[in-house]
Amino acid sequence: MECKKESNLKICSCSYEPCSRKGICCDCMAYHLPKRQLPGCFFPKDAEKTYNRSFENFAELVATKRV
């Protein structure tokens, strides 16, 4: 399967600029899941900028209908 990095970058909302995984979704998921986190693109912009990408934070956002 060919990586769609260039098209992924157009929709990537991650605000962590030095990230080497930007646009490479499979690498991003592989990095975050063992840490019990989701990638930044799963979060609303204001929540993503806190860098709290935990499952628990995501669940709280879902419970409060922010996601």
Image (spheres, grey):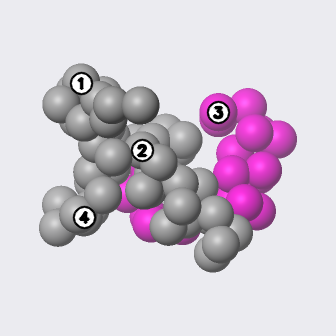
User: In the orientation shown, which residue stands out farthest toward the front?
Assistant: 1
Question: Looking at the rendered structure, which numbered label has been put on residue 19?
Answer: 4
Which label sits in the foreground, 4 or 1?
1
Query: Which sits in the foreground, 50 or 36?
Result: 36
| Three-letter amino acid code of the residue under disc 2 | Cys
Q: Quick one: quadrant of the C terminus?
A: top right
Q: CA distance from mark 4 to mark 1?
A: 17 Å
> Residue 38: percent from the left, percent from the top?
59, 55
Does residue 53 show up magenta in the picture? yes
Neighbor class of circle 2 (other Cα within 10 Å; few <14, some 14-19, many 20+) is: some
Q: Please provide the residue range marked out in magenta.
A: 46-67
Label 4 or label 1, whichever comes before in sequence order:
1
Neighbor class of circle 1 (other Cα within 10 Å; few <14, some 14-19, many 20+) is: few
The residue under label 3 is 67
> Residue 64: percent from the left, percent from the top?
77, 39
The residue under label 2 is 25
